[in-house]
Image: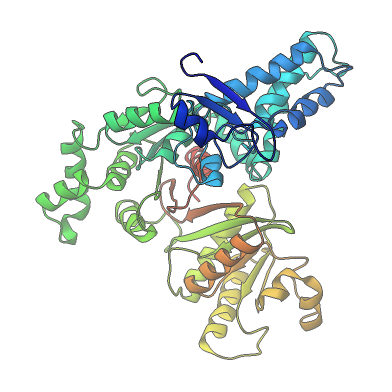
């Protein structure tokens, strides 16, 4: 056999020769099988569903050689494309880059549909066998993307607005692989002008490892967190903010140099960026501490809050306050409720608010129940037109018939889409239970509300898509004002 022989042992369930045996004789062999427990699985799910999808979408009269070749080229291009965090996570593999052990994409790579179907459809049109040519391929690809990312439809109005005037978004953890992958998407989609805080050499090395096409200086800016010449100005700016809060010049200097989140915050404060994203490393509160100290609250509010969206089969549900206030007062909850309603409207959804408690319309007079009743009183004074009721149980919030049995004249109609919890503990527990059990992990957020600048703090489990979504939301805030 020649050097690096290609062995296609495709019999199922037992290949003609097992890869370990072939490798023992020829370590340089490139081996493909039909099995998922070995690298390079050859499976017809790689092409046939998406080949047919493209053919059907243009009403192709036949599947000709041009369409088959387009399918093959699309598969090959995807194999050599940048890594997908979704695929790596699904297959439990850290690195999936083109080479002898990754010659073809994984059979369930979610990107296959948006690569193969458009390529096949275009080949059908070019070869004259399409009876329903596609006029807008960008819209077609966007429609196909909704099969991959369940947040696409939800985020569509945000994405559309962000693209109209892409803003500079500084991302504090610029060396993180998910941030780099998100940067590739942001540049490709034209959603933002990314600024990454990190060491240029590390960023460049990881871009190559991930097979990403973006380049520093061309597609995004890098702020070297070890030696940027602006650091003297940054720490002095931070010192001016903190000098009457017990921070010395030396402490300010060390804080800025050692904290990428603080670097990003000072850049936003100085107008060198329009919005900011952080939180893919570390705890929420260590990032929030920096954000609150540097920016404070926006005009008209005295508290910040965090809200998460869950895209449930029954509809979109928003929960607050999931991350900021341990045990908010009625006054704070009232402000958080109004900010949540305003935020939900930005997604094109009319808010319907339920104030949750273990008590339901006065069945308990404990402090927690009284707090939610007081919150309702305050919100009704501040926003009398807002559709809201409480305090109530969770089932009454989501099922109108249960609520009507208890309170027939409730002003809240239908299912509530904003659930305001009495404290962070209840909010976080509810959010995580619903995220795992009911929403297939399809979430947006946390959305930080009440800060004077467009800032969002993610969590370490944030996916690439969630980072992209939150950057787009931050861009829209930079255009129209913070939440």
Left or right of residue 55, residue 292 in this image = left
Q: Where residue 155 sits: x, y (%)? A: 62, 43
Q: Is residue 34 left or right of residue 447?
A: right
Give the camera-side residue of 275 and 335: 275
Q: Quadrant of residue 364?
A: bottom right
Q: List x then y, in percent, for residue 378.
A: 56, 73
Where 89 sits versus 165, above or below? Answer: below
- Determine the residue positioned at 58% across, 42% down: 37
Q: Residue drawn at (34%, 53%), measured in percent from left and top?
A: 291
- Looking at this view, is 121 or 19 the one in front? 19
Coloring basis for residues: rainbow
- The residue under the point 70% across, 14% down is 69
In the displayed structure, would residue 417 be above or below residue 203? below
Question: Residue 287's spot in the image, x, y percent?
Answer: 34, 54
Looking at the image, residue 207 sits to the left or right of residue 135; the answer is left
Look at the image and tell me whether residue 250 can be seen.
Answer: yes
The residue at the point 55 percent across, 20 percent down is 6
| Front position in the image: 200 or 381 | 200
Above or below: residue 169 compared with residue 221: below
């Amino acid at each position: 056999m020649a050097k690096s022989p290609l062995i296609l042992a495709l019999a199922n369930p037992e290949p003609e020769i097992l890869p370990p045996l072939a490798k023992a004789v020829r370590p340089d062999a490139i081996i493909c099988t039909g099995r998922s427990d070995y690298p390079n699985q050859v499976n017809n799910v790689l092409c046939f569903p998406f080949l047919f999808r493209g053919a059907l979408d243009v009403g192709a009269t036949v599947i000709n050689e041009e369409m088959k070749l387009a399918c093959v080229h699309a598969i090959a291009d995807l194999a050599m494309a940048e890594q997908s965090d979704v695929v790596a996570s699904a297959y439990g593999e850290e690195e999936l880059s083109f080479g002898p052990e990754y010659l073809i994409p994984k059979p369930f790579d979610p990107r296959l549909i948006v690569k193969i179907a458009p390529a096949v459809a275009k080949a059908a049109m070019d070869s004259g066998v399409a009876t329903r040519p596609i006029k807008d391929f960008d819209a077609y690809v966007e429609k196909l993307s909704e099969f991959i990312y369940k947040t696409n439809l939800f985020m569509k109005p945000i994405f559309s607005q962000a693209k109209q005037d892409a803003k500079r978004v500084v991302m504090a953890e610029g060396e993180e692989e998910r941030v780099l992958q998100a940067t590739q998407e942001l540049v490709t989609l034209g959603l933002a002008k990314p600024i990454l805080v990190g060491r240029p050499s590390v960023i460049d090395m990881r871009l190559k490892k991930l097979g990403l096409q973006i380049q520093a200086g061309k597609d995004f800016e890098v702020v070297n967190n070890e030696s940027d010449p602006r650091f003297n100005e940054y720490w002095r700016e931070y010192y001016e903010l903190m000098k009457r809060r017990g921070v010395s010049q030396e402490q300010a200097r060390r804080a800025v140099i050692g904290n990428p989140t603080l670097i990003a915050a000072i850049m936003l404060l100085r107008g060198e960026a329009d919005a900011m994203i952080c939180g893919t490393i570390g705890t929420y509160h260590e990032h929030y501490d920096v954000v609150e100290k540097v920016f404070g609250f926006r005009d008209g509010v005295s508290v910040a809050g965090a809200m998460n969206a869950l895209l449930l089969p029954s509809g979109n549900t928003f929960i607050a306050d999931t991350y900021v206030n341990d045990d908010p007062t009625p006054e704070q909850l009232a402000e958080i409720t109004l900010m949540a309603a305003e935020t939900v409207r930005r997604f094109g959804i009319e808010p319907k608010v339920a104030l949750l408690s273990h008590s339901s319309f006065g069945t308990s007079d404990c402090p927690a129940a009284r707090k939610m009743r007081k919150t309702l009183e305050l919100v009704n004074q501040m926003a009398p037109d807002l559709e809201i009721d409480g305090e109530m149980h969770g089932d009454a919030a989501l099922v109108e018939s249960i609520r009507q049995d208890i309170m027939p004249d409730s002003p809240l109609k239908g299912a509530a889409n904003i659930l305001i919890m009495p404290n962070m503990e209840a909010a976080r527990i509810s959010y995580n239970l619903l995220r795992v059990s009911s929403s297939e992990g399809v979430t947006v957020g946390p959305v930080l509300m009440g800060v004077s600048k467009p800032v969002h703090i993610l969590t370490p489990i944030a996916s690439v898509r969630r980072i992209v979504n939150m950057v787009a939301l931050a861009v829209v805030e930079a255009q129209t004002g913070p939440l």
